[in-house]
């Protein structure tokens, strides 16, 4: 783990809000490169809930920052907890629909680690090394499994 990430997010619980945005049979994912060369992490767009900000405001802000897309927020899908010292995250996943804007890689104002955003098919995403995928993809196994997740999971 990068020391900068551990310093910023370590030893505290972080609440993240994430959106599953589908275009046909493809899912929108963000590629976060590690501060360590050669490492990357593919996950649905989303980010940290700030004090005083609603879950919906957070999700809209994160999509604007990371993808340049405006969204409408649908139903709550599932939650996850990730604990791997020094990180501890609670993640809330919502169904979202793209309503306006063209997909374009934005910025992560906290850390400069956002490398790309794109809609990927199941084949394109699931052939990436497992270590480079968010835990929900490992948990679900495929897009049908992802679409059927509900409840709360430890990943």
Image (spheres, rainbow, N blue to C red):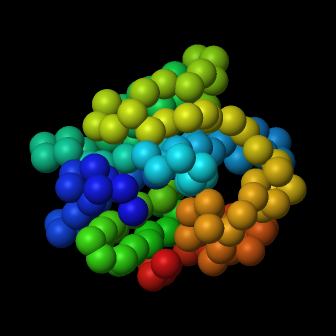
Q: Residue furthest front?
A: 37
Residue positioned 47% across, 32% down in the render = 66
The answer to whether 96 is drawn above or below residue 126 in the figure is above
Q: Residue furthest bottom?
A: 154
Q: State which quadrant residue 117 falls in.
A: top right
Residue positioned 20% across, 55% down in the render = 7
Q: From the viewer's perspective, is 52 left or right of 41?
A: left
Horizontal and vertical percent position of residue 24: 82, 42
Q: Residue furthest top?
A: 101
Q: From the viewer's perspective, is 64 left or right of 147?
A: left
Q: Quadrant of the N terminus?
A: bottom left
Q: State which quadrant residue 143 falls in.
A: bottom right
The one of 70 and 4 positioned closer to us in this rendering: 4
Horizontal and vertical percent position of residue 95: 56, 51
Q: Is residue 148 visible?
A: no
Horizontal and vertical percent position of residue 64: 44, 27
The image shows a total of numbered marks equal to 0
The answer to whether 43 is drawn above or below residue 92 in the figure is above
Q: From the viewer's perspective, is 75 left or right of 142?
A: left
The answer to whether 127 is drawn above or below residue 63 in the figure is below
The one of 15 and 106 positioned closer to us in this rendering: 106
Horizontal and vertical percent position of residue 17: 39, 52
The answer to whether 32 is drawn above or below residue 134 in the figure is above
The one of 126 and 55 positioned closer to us in this rendering: 126
Q: From the viewer's perspective, is 77 left or right of 109?
A: right
Q: Residue furthest right?
A: 123
Residue positioned 29% across, 56% down in the render = 3
Q: Is residue 92 visible?
A: yes
Residue positioned 39% across, 74% down in the render = 82
């Amino acid at each position: 783990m990068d020391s900068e990430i551990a310093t910023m997010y370590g030893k505290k619980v972080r609440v993240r809000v994430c959106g599953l945005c589908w275009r046909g049979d493809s899912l929108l994912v963000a590629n976060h490169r590690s501060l360590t060369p050669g490492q990357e992490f593919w996950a649905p767009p989303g980010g940290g809930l700030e004090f005083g900000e609603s879950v919906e405001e957070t999700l809209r802000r994160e999509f604007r920052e990371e993808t340049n897309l405006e969204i409408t927020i649908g139903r709550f899908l599932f939650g996850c907890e990730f604990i791997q010292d020094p990180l501890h995250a609670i993640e809330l996943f919502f169904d979202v629909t793209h309503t306006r804007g063209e997909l374009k890689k934005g910025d992560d104002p906290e850390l400069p680690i956002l490398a790309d955003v794109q809609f990927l098919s199941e084949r394109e995403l699931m052939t990436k090394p497992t270590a480079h995928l968010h835990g929900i993809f490992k948990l679900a196994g495929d897009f049908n499994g992802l679409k059927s997740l509900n409840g709360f999971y430890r990943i």
